[in-house]
Every structure is written in structure tokens, then in C-alpha cells.
Amino acid sequence: MTKTFVNRRLHSLLGVVPIGLFLIEHLVANATAAGGPEKFNETVALINKLPFVLFLEIVFIWLPILFHAIYGVYIAFQAKNTLPRYGYFRNWMFYLQRVTGLIAFVYIAWHVWETRVQAAFGQPVDFNMMANILSSPLMVVFYVIGVLSTVFHFSNGLWSFAVSWGIAIGPRAQRHMTYVSLVVFILLSIVGLMAIFSFVTV
């Protein structure tokens, strides 16, 4: 068992657990903004009241994301894309997985800077913070692209995870997994976009 094999398996696993689960939780929590500022602020306060929240974030969110992101960038630049020669569906998914991974890397880093880092400097993470961030049309576009790229990267990554871990074996199972990935992408995209536009005040 080579180091590369172990790193790739760990990279794949972390992309689903815990990162994927955190993505779902984060999108759903942000979507509570559709219920108004008070509902969103209550959700944030509830999360911040969890015991050992900082420890949990570091161990189960930030360290896994850091490893997945850094190793993912390495994989993206090491991968040999065959898209110009072979334009079939799975090659497109392979190519888009790398592209959206790089976009997600930039988006998540910026989002963390605008929220968690600013919170460390004393600025509260609440509805007003997100409304101020998304008061610029350019930031709305950036967040839409970032969220959709992150959701696609996770959804399509579920297919790769199922195949590499022996869950989806054979063409039929892999085709079914493609449909599962598509449904996950559509549902999470709706939740993510609803969250973004809930902060946009006209």
C-alpha cells in the first residue's frame, strides 16, 4: 500500500465525511435566513453555543478541509486531462471536478476570511454581516459561482467516492450513482442559492 494510495483514499473519504456533511449542514443553516434575520441569528447563536465548538471546528472541519484542499490542488495540477481528445461525459466530469475544486478553494478561503477571521477580530457573524457582504452585485455573482462550484465538486465527488471505494461496481451501478449525484447537486444548489438571495436586500 503506497503513500499515494493512502493519501488519495484519505482525500476521497474526507471529501464526504466530514467535509460533505459539514457542507450540507452549513447550507441548510444559512438557508434559515429565508425566515428572516432573527431566525438566522438564532441559528448562528445555537451553533456557537455547542460545547467545544472551536475544538470541533478545528479537528473536524478546518484540518480536513485544509488537507483536502491542498492535496486536491496537487491532484488537479498532476492530472492528465484527456478532454481535448476524448469529449465523452465522464471526461467532462473529470475536468469539471478539477476546475470546480480550484474555484471552491478560492471561494472557501475568501468566505472564511470574510466571516470566521473577521469574527476573531470581534465582528459578529450575523445576518447583517452577510447582507453587507452581498450588498455588492459582484460579490453576489462571486458567491453564486462559488457555491455552485462547491456543490458540484461535492456532488460529482460522490460518484468518484462510490466507485473508488467499491460501492458502485459495474456500469449500471455507476449510472445510478450519476443520477444520485445529479439529484444531490440540484437539491443543494437550490438550498445554497436560496441562502444567498435571502441576504440580498433590494
Image: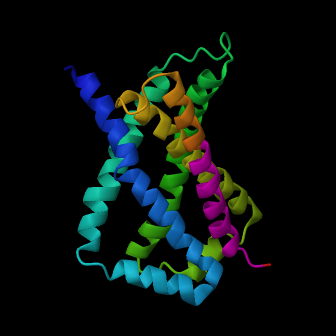
Image check: 3 left or right of 163? left
Residue at left offset 41%, top offset 35%: 161
The spot of residue 43 in percent (x, y) is 47, 81
Q: Main secondary structure of the magenta part?
A: helix
Name the image quarter holding residue 90. top right
Measured as percent of width and height from the top left, residue 89 is found at: 65, 24
Picture quarter with the C terminus:
bottom right
Placement of 73 over or under 104, stated as above or below? above
Residue reaching furthest bottom?
38
What's the magenta region? 182-201
**Residue 179, horizontal then vertical, whole percent:** 60, 39
Q: Nearer the viewer, residue 109 or 26?
A: 26
Instruction: Name the quarter where the N terminus is drawn.
Output: top left
Q: Is residue 112 visible?
A: no
Colouring chosen for the image of the structure: rainbow
Q: Is residue 191 magenta?
A: yes
What residue is drawn where x is 25% and y is 58%? 59
What's the residue at 31%, 32% (across, down)? Answer: 9
**Residue 85, above or below 97:** above
**In the image, farthest residue toward the front:** 172
* Quadrant position of residue 15: top left
Residue at image position (54%, 38%) is: 156
